[in-house]
Image (cartoon, helix red, strand yellow):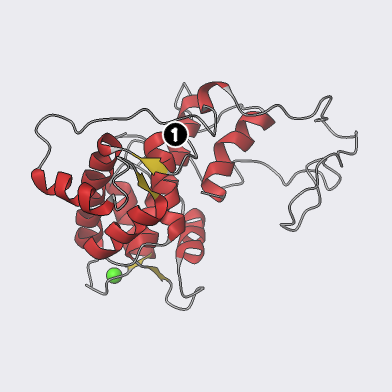
Amino acid sequence: MAGYPPPGSGYPYGAPPNPYGAAPPPSAPYGPAGGKPPKEGKGQGAGYYQYQTPPPLPTGPYGSPFAGLVQSAFPPGTDPNVVACFQAADRDGSGFIDDKELQQVLSSYNQSFSIRTVHLLMYLFTNTNVRKIGPKEFTSVFYSLQNWRAIFERFDRDRSSKIDASELREALLSIGFAVSPVVLDLLVSKFDKSGGKNKAIEYDNFIECCLTVKGLTEKFKEKDTMYTGSATLTYESFMLTVLPFLVA
Ligand SMILES: [Ca+2]
């Protein structure tokens, strides 16, 4: 991930000037503009895309959303604190931690964690929507969060316990993502819990924000094999990429 995009190479994944082109034609069959969810089966038959058949269930590289989790074990040499933390979190002793259990343990170790952030973490560490993790995934989540915590503290330069736009820009750059000012503003306004009043992002939302940028960029990179900053992907692939982040 480091070095992608190369520092100082401009803004391959964002703003200027309309890299993703004009808005879709007003009658595009993606459903009404204005943020309302499109209704199924309302494709108009015009435009450049048309469903011939009902959309298939997600399969293939995205995995089945209901795939079972294989029982995992702690990696060799796992810190006993992590094991103890897992066991304390696994209240029903099932060997798995569900979303509520994870939320509780994360909230006690750090700060408040929204269930949305928890769901996104679980999605990224299992690549499924099962919303259960075993010892192996828990260990990864644990260390990953330690990492995010360190990044948060390092870039919260004014010690406000929030990350503002310029702090976020530097934090994202440090992990290899150069987003444009427009994207940066959008991220801050979307992840600001105060609805835009603070113009800054709190800890759990910062993690969610970074996971979203990282996750989406990595998915995009899979399609952008030449690392040019643009890619061709199908409607189906686009939807399957974006939806898990929208409704984690
Ligand atoms: Ca700050």
The reply to whether residue 122 is visible in this rendering is yes
Quadrant holding the N terminus:
top left
Relative to residue 96, is residue 186 depicted above or below? below
Neighbourhood count class around disc 1 (C-alpha, 10 Å): few under 14, some 14–19, many 20 upward: some
SS at badge 1:
loop
| Percent of width and height locating residue 165 | 39, 64
Q: Is residue 189 left or right of residue 117?
A: right
Task: State the residue in front, 38 or 24.
Answer: 38
Q: Give the residue displayed 44% in from the left and 44% down from the top.
A: 131
Q: Residue furthest bottom?
A: 197
Q: Is residue 246 left or right of residue 35?
A: left
| Percent of width and height locating residue 27 | 86, 45
Q: Give the residue displayed 82% in from the left and 29% down from the top.
A: 51
Q: Amino acid at mark 1?
A: Asn
Relative to residue 190, is residue 15 depicted above or below? above
Q: Residue furthest right?
A: 45
Relative to residue 22, is residue 238 depicted above or below? above
Q: Give the residue displayed 22% in from the left and 72% down from the top.
A: 159
Q: Is residue 238 left or right of residue 41?
A: left
Name the residue tied to disc 1: 127
